[in-house]
């Protein structure tokens, strides 16, 4: 990894950690998030993986008609703003965000997130 890539990765990690800390407090079932990237194809290759505890909480989060503290649309807007603050912008950020659950990983990959993330 080049020095500029390391700096960019550290900046991404800091921004995503801030978003994660907020989401843990505001979103029912939210567990963690991470990013995957190939810096030779940055930012097109950037993927943000957002993990919930189970499908029920992910479905509630995704339901835009529900009144809740933070829903999917609001979360995506917060993520977009965080990335924009680092001069990372996309024409359609939804193509760069993947939602997943702990239970799906357990069922399909025996809890092995490294194997599961490779499919993204």
Image (cartoon, grey):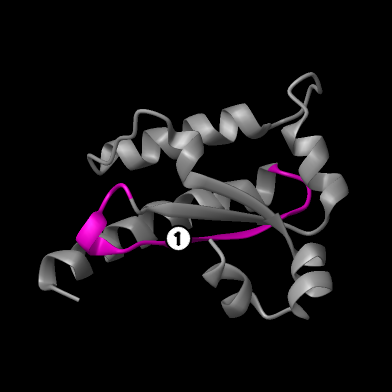
**Magenta region, residue range:** 27-44
Tag 1 secondary structure? strand
Percent from the top left, x then y, of residue 113? 63, 75
Q: Which of 116 and 66 is in front in this view?
A: 116
Q: Nearer the viewer, residue 61 or 28?
A: 61
Q: Is residue 97 above or below residue 117?
A: above
Q: Name the residue under label 1.
A: 35
Q: Which residue lies furthest to the right in this view?
A: 56
Magenta stretch encompasses residue 10: no
Q: How many residues crowd around disc 1 within 10 Å: few (fewer than 14), some, or many (20 or more)?
A: some
Residue at image point 46% right, 44% down: 96
Percent from the top left, x then y, of residue 110? 78, 81
Residue at image point 34% right, 34% down: 90
Q: Is residue 39 above or below residue 77?
A: below
Percent from the top left, x then y, of residue 21? 55, 54
Would residue 64 appear left or right of 99 to someone viewing this image? right
Q: Nearer the viewer, residue 119 or 102?
A: 119
Question: Number of callouts in the render?
Answer: 1
Would residue 98 appear left or right of 43 to someone viewing this image? right
Q: Residue furthest front?
A: 119
Residue at image point 33% right, 56% down: 12
Residue at image point 28% right, 58% down: 11
């Amino acid at each position: 990894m080049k020095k500029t890539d390391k700096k960019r990765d550290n900046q991404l990690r800091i921004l995503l950690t801030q978003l994660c800390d907020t989401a843990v407090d505001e979103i029912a079932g939210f567990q963690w998030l991470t990013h995957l990237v190939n810096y030779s194809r940055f930012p097109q290759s950037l993927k943000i993986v957002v993990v919930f505890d189970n499908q029920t909480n992910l479905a509630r989060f995704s339901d835009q008609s529900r009144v809740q503290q933070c829903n999917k649309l609001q979360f995506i807007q917060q993520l977009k703003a965080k990335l924009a603050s680092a001069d990372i912008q996309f024409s359609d950020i939804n193509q760069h965000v993947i939602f997943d659950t702990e239970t799906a990983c357990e069922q399909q990959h025996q809890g092995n997130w490294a194997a599961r993330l490779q499919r993204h």
